[in-house]
Image (cartoon, rainbow, N blue to C red):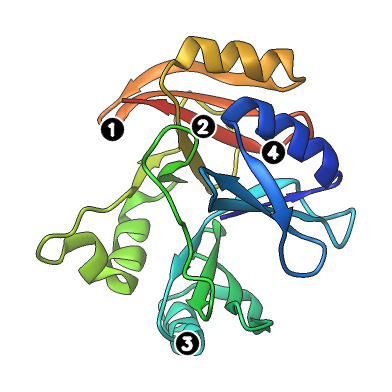
């Protein structure tokens, strides 16, 4: 997962204090976010100021080109065709039939998360969809084994866009980071210049609050 930010240095200060991340240079002008010395995310500068300030979750695939074809055949579209990222891997950006954007990652030397599901790291991706039947068909077809195969333990769910969000909110993915103390984390977000979009609410996968960072990128905090 990666954040596209107008000011990467400001992002480093925000997330470094919030989650205890450290940073090192990655590909181009992006940086790895490290927790315990292993990568948990990356921060990258926006190439175009008109681009949204967002967190993007990427799904692993052994063949980004082949998965791109399946995405378009299922009613989605490719926003960015597969492209190499040095020897790290191949990336692409796609949108589902309702327009929710997600990434694809075909690993080279970079396999993906070095740590997840622990405090300060990725724990869940929630798709907020207007038509959950469409989402079920699309993602169930693309990622059937990961979601429903024997022994599958998915960290990806979906829900309807409800009163938690403004009526004009488009379908989207919301990345969740795990925290030990939700109230303390919310206090830190506000102290660091972020804001609370949705105060804590209970879900089937834990207690969640939706926040934005000090540049407007939305994400969620999850306490289990």
Residue depicted at x 77% and y 28%: 214
Q: Which residue is mark 3?
A: 69
Sequence order check: which comes first, mark 4 or mark 1?
A: 1
Observer-side mark, 3 or 1, equals: 1
Residue 53, horizontal then vertical, whole percent:
75, 46
Callout 1: 10 Å neighbours few (<14), some, many (20+)?
Answer: few
Cα–Cα gap, marks 4 and 1:
22 Å
Callout 2: 10 Å neighbours few (<14), some, many (20+)?
Answer: many
Quarter of the figure with residue 45: bottom right
Residue depicted at x 67% and y 34%: 15
Q: Secondary structure at mark 4?
A: loop
Residue 154, horizontal then vertical, whole percent:
27, 53
Cα–Cα gap, marks 2 and 4:
10 Å
Residue depicted at x 54% and y 26%: 210
Taking the image as drawn, is residue 166 in sight? no
Cα–Cα gap, marks 3 and 2:
31 Å
Sequence order check: which comes first, mark 3 or mark 4?
A: 3
Q: Which residue is mark 1?
A: 205
Q: Which residue is mark 2?
A: 220
Residue 103, horizontal then vertical, whole percent:
55, 65
- For this view, does 90 lie left or right of residue 135? right
Cα–Cα gap, marks 1 and 2:
13 Å
Q: Residue furthest front?
A: 37
Q: Secondary structure at mark 3?
A: helix
């Amino acid at each position: 997962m990666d954040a596209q930010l107008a000011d990467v240095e400001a992002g480093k200060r925000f997330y470094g204090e919030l989650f205890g991340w450290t940073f090192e240079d990655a590909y181009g002008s992006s940086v790895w976010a490290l927790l315990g010395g292993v990568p948990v995310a990356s921060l990258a500068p926006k190439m175009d100021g008109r681009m949204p300030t967002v967190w993007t979750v990427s799904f692993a695939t052994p063949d980004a080109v082949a998965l791109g074809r399946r995405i378009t055949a299922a009613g989605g579209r490719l926003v960015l065709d597969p492209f190499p990222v040095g020897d790290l891997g191949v990336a692409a950006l796609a949108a589902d039939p309702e327009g929710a954007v997600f990434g694809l990652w075909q690993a080279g030397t970079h396999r993906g998360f070095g740590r997840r599901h622990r405090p300060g790291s990725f724990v869940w991706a929630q798709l907020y969809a207007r038509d959950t039947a469409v989402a079920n068909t699309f993602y169930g077809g693309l990622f059937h084994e990961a979601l429903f195969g024997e022994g599958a333990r998915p960290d990806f769910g979906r829900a309807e866009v409800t009163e938690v969000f403004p009526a004009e909110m488009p379908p989207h993915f919301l990345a969740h980071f795990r925290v030990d103390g939700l109230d303390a984390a919310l206090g830190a977000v506000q102290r660091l210049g972020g804001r609370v979009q949705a105060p804590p609410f209970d879900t089937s996968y834990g207690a969640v609050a939706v926040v934005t960072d000090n540049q407007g990128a939305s994400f969620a905090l999850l306490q289990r």
